[in-house]
Amino acid sequence: MAGGSADLRAILPATSNWSPIMRLRNFFALSLIGSLALTACSKDDPATDDSNTGDDTAVDDTGEALKDADNDGYLSDVDCNDLDAFVNPGADEIIADGTDSDCDGLELCYEDADGDGFGGEGTVTSDSMDCSAAGVSATADDCEDSDVAYNPNATEDDCTDPNDYNCDGSTGYEDGDKDGWAACEECNDSDAAINPDAVELTADNVDQNCDGAEVCYVDADSDGYRNIDTSLTVESVDLDCDDLGEGSSTETSDDCDDDTPTTNPGASEVWYDGVDADCGGDNDFDADGDGFESDAYSGDDCDDTSASINSSATDTAQNGIDEDCDGSDAPYTVTDLSTGDLIVTEIMYDPSAVTDANGEWFELKNVSGGQVDLDGLYVYDDGGSAFTVSGELIVEDEGYVVFGINDDSTANGGITVDYQYSSWSLANTEDEVNLAESSSKSTVFDSVAYDEADDFWSAAMVDGSARGETLNLDSDHVDADENDFAGHWCISSTATSGGDYGTPGTTNESCGYTYTFDSDISSILSGSCATCHTTSSSGSLTAIETWSSTVAVASTQSTSYYLFEPFSSEDSYMIHKIDGTQSSVGGSGNQMPKTGSISSANQTILETWIDEGAPK
C-alpha cells in the first residue's frame, strides 16, 4: 500500500498551488481515497476472491471499466476529477478558486471591465483557470470597475479630491465644516463661513476668504478715526487693522478730513480759523452754535460764547446783558415796575414867563434800578383828568423825564420837554399827580397832592406867591413816601433860560435844611428823654424816637396840636412840653425832660428843624 500512496500523491496537483478552498476540498477527497484503499487491502485478492464476479458494465472507449472513485454520483468519463467529490458536472462553480468545479472546462472569474487587473463585483467565465487573462480577475476588490483610475494599486495624492481611488475605504480629503472645501485648501475647516469662496468681512480680524490678508477700513492719516466714507477699504497683510492707513472696527467712522491727523472728533476746536477741527459739522464762525455767526467775522452775534445771545433772542429787561444784540439792554416796561420805582420830583403848576397853557410841566425820576421804557404809563389826577404815554419813552436809571403841555421850547419858556401830553393840566391852587402802570391802577408808583389850603403845603408854596417857581422835592428825600410830606418840598431858586425857576431834567436842588431828624433830632430826643420814656413808663422811647411817630402826629395830651408841627415850632406840643407851657395849649403832665433839661442849643436845633419843615 505504500506504493499505492506514492501513486496517489502523483495524481494530485502540487499542494503549494492550492487555494484554501482547494485544500479543504482535496482533504476530503484524500480522506475518501484513503478509506477505499484500506478497504481494498482488507479484502482478498481479486484473483482468489470468490465474491468478485467481475461484472463491471460501464467501460470507456478503450474498454476499461468506468468508476466513480469519489462517490459523487458521476463516473470518471464525465467527472473531470473523480478524486474530488466536489468536482463534477453538477457542482457549483466556485469563483476564482482555480478549479473547474462543474467540469465545463471554464473557470468563473471576477470581471475586470476596465482592464486595470482588478475585478469588480460582476462575474464571467474564462478558460483561464487562475483568472489571469485579460478582462478577468481572481479578486473583486475594484470599487469602481468602470474606471481604470479606481483599483487597490491606485495612488491618492490630491487632498482636494474626495474620491477613494485605491478602494481602501478612506481618502486624503477632509471637509470637517461641510462647506465644500477640503481642509487642505482652506484656512479653518471648523467654520463653514470660512473658505476661499467666502466674502471677506471688513476689519473683524478674521480671514474669511483664506487669502492670508484682512480687509480694513481706511484711516489715511492714522489718527485713530476712520474715514467718514465707510465704503472705502484697504487690504492689510495681517488681521489686526492696526498698521498705518488702516482703520479697525473699534474706531469710529467720523473723520471729516482723513488726510489731516489734527482734524478728527477728538481734536480741540479752534474757532474762527475756517477749519472744523473736531468734525462737529458746526459753523466755525458760530462758536456757541446758536445759528448766528460772530459779529467779529461779519455776522450778527454780539456774544458768540452764549447761545442765548444773538440778534433773534429775546432781551431780558435790565439784566445787564444785551441778549438781542441791538446795542443795549432791554429796558423795563411799566408793567415790570413796583410802587416807588418812579418818583414825582418837580412840578411847574403856575408858570410866569409864559401862559399855563404853554408852560406847565412836571418831572419824575426813575429809581427802579434799571432803564425804563415809559410807554403805557398812566398819569392822572383825582378829578378824572388823565393821559397815557404812547410810544417809546426811555428814561435811564436815576434819570429824569419831563412831561409838558407844550414841547416847543420857544413857546414853553425854554423847557426841554421829553413828552408832550394833552387832556391834562395842573391847577394853580391844588392838584394831584398820580403815576400808575395802566388805567386799571393796579400798581400806583407814586402820588403827590399839593394844596395851598393845607398849612404845610401853603408854607412850602410860600403862601401861593411862588408863581414862576417850581415845587422842588429836596434832593435828599427822593422817595415815594417822603415826597408825600410837604416839608420835603421847597420852591426852586434855579433860573431857567426862559425866566422862570426850576431844574427840569436834572438833579433837584437841596432845600437847604440845617438839620434833619435822622441826622440831628433823633439823638437829642434819645439822649434827653430816655430816662422816662421807656417801654415800662410814660410811653415807649421809640414812640418819640422816630420821625413818623412824632412829625405831624397829634399829641394824646392835647389832640389839637401835633407833637412836631412842620414849619411852626411855636405850635409844636413838644416845644411847649420842653418850655413847660403845655397847660396853656390844653396839655398836661410834667415839663420835659422830667429830670434835668434840654440845653438851649439843642432846643434851638429842634426849633430850627421844625421851622424848616421838620424834614426826615
Image: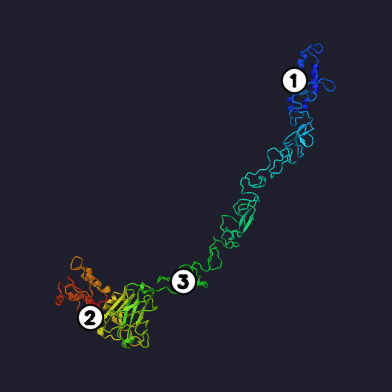
**Tag 3: amino acid:** Ser
Q: In this picture, is 501 found above or below 577?
A: below
Number of labels in the image equals 3
Looking at the image, residue 263 lies above or below residue 479: above
Q: Is residue 3 above or below residue 499?
A: above
How far separated are the C-alphas under marks 2 and 3? 57 Å
Report the side of 298 relative to 188 (left or right): left
Q: Can you tell which of label 2 and label 1 is closer to the viewer?
A: 1
Q: Amino acid at mark 1?
A: Leu
Label number found at residue 381: none
> Whole-percent x and y of residue 36?
76, 18
Which residue is under mark 1?
Answer: 32
Q: Nearer the viewer, residue 80 or 148?
A: 80
How far across and how far down the image is residue 437, in percent? Answer: 34, 75
Q: Residue at x 23, y 80 (%)?
A: 455
**Which residue is located at x 62 percent, y 47 percent?**
192
Secondary structure state at the residue bearing disc 2: helix
Q: Split into 4 quadrants, where in the image is the N terminus?
A: top right
The quarter of the displayed image where residue 409 is located: bottom left
Compare marks 3 and 1 and give the one earlier in the sequence. 1
- Labels 2 and 3: the sequence-earlier one: 3
- List the residue tagged with mark 2: 455
Left or right: residue 69 compared with residue 516:
right
The answer to whether 307 appears left or right of 7 in the picture is left
The quarter of the image holding the C terminus is bottom left
Q: From what the image shows, is residue 110 above or below residue 284?
A: above
Confirm or deny contact between disc 2 and disc 1 (CB under 8 A). Answer: no
| Residue 379 in the image, given as x and y percentages of width and height | 32, 78
Mark 2 and mark 1: span between their CA atoms? 179 Å
* Image location of residue 492, percent across then percent down: 31, 83
Q: Which of marks 1 and 2 precedes in the sequence? A: 1
Residue under pointer 3: 312
